[in-house]
Image (cartoon, rainbow, N blue to C red):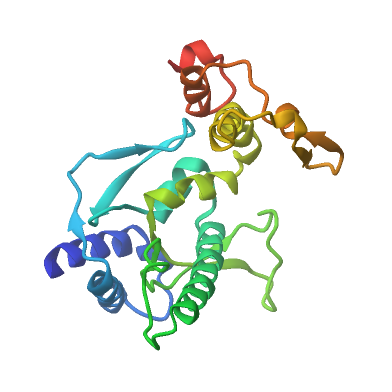
């Protein structure tokens, strides 16, 4: 796998050749290979079939690069590009998610109480330890200039597990449309969870703080199949066109 990791890392570095920070392409590539090898010690990886693409709930698609026994891994920068998320914002999101995973793993380890450090909560993200920097035009929004008057952001790249994609989409510029698309499918899931019981007796709270019942919150007039089509339709288009 070392050669496969090297080719994969070198391709990422080459795409960011103009934005390398502190280290040249050889060292950047070596850092990413080392990160992949460490990750693979606890989560053995194999290369994915070429051309295997994952649909991003209708908002784009991105390729799978590696697979494990029970997961598929994509490159965060490619997912971010497909969704229109700046890579430096995507990396900051992944970093926060990883910190949450570390906290969760610590809690699991303490509950287990055998003094051993586990990894089961740490398999969704792999920081490739790449150091890139991008300088923005003067009119780039949302970034304050540094002491020298330049606007810039640091970024890198990560592997992200397929089962974390929905969380990323929900925090992307498509968040509102994504949640709207998923609403009827959530309703079916809730009805299944409660086993067909009387949801009208269960109190619930809307996002604006107004009280309601679970029956009203999880009401849907769509069939399960229609709800699935709606969840995958992407930007607002008629459900029939997404079939």
**Residue at position x 38%, y 54% in the image:** 161
User: Does 2 appear above or below 182?
Assistant: below
The image quadrant where one finds the N terminus is: bottom left
In the picture provided, is 164 more to the left or to the right than 180? left
Q: Position of residue 3 (x, y in %)?
A: 12, 66
x%, y% of residue 18?
40, 64
Give the mark count: 0
Given residues 193 and 211, the one toward you in this image is 193
Horizontal side, residue 138 vs residue 157: left or right: right
State left or right for residue 114 relative to residue 152: left
Residue drawn at x 29%, y 47% is 64
Q: Please determine whether, in this image, residue 91 is positioned above or below residue 212.
A: below
**In the image, residue 85 above or below residue 203:** below
Identity of the residue drawn at 46% across and 47% down = 165
Provide residue 155's location: percent of width, then percent of height.
49, 66
Query: 15 or 38: which is nearer to us?
Result: 38
The relative height of residue 39 versus residue 69 in the rendered view (above or below) is below
Residue lying at the far bottom in this picture: please name it. 115
Q: Nearer the viewer, residue 206 or 11?
A: 206
Is residue 109 toward the left or the right of residue 5 in the image? right
Residue 139 percent across, percent down from the top left: 69, 54
The answer to which quarter of the image holds residue 189 is: top right
């Amino acid at each position: 796998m070392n050669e496969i990791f090297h080719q994969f890392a070198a391709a990422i570095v080459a795409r960011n050749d103009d934005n390398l920070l502190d280290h040249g392409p050889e060292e950047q590539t070596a850092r990413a290979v080392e990160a992949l090898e460490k990750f693979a010690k606890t989560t053995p990886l194999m290369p994915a079939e070429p051309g295997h693409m994952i649909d991003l709930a209708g908002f784009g698609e991105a390729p799978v690069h590696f697979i494990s026994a029970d997961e598929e891994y994509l490159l965060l920068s490619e997912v971010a590009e497909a969704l229109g998320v700046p890579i430096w914002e995507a990396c900051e999101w992944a970093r926060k998610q990883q910190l949450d995973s570390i906290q969760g793993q610590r809690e699991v380890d303490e509950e287990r109480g055998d003094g051993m450090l586990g990894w089961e909560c740490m398999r969704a993200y792999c920081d490739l330890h790449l150091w890139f920097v991008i300088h923005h035009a003067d009119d780039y929004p949302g970034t304050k200039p540094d002491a020298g008057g330049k606007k810039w952001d640091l970024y890198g790249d990560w592997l992200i597990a397929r089962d974390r994609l929905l969380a990323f989409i929900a925090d992307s510029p498509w968040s509102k449309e994504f949640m709207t698309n998923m609403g009827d499918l959530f309703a079916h899931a809730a009805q299944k969870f409660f086993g067909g019981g009387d949801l009208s007796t269960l109190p619930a709270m809307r996002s604006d703080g107004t009280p309601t019942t679970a029956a009203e919150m999880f009401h849907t007039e769509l069939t399960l199949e229609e709800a699935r089509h709606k969840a995958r339709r992407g930007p607002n288009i008629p459900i029939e066109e997404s079939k």
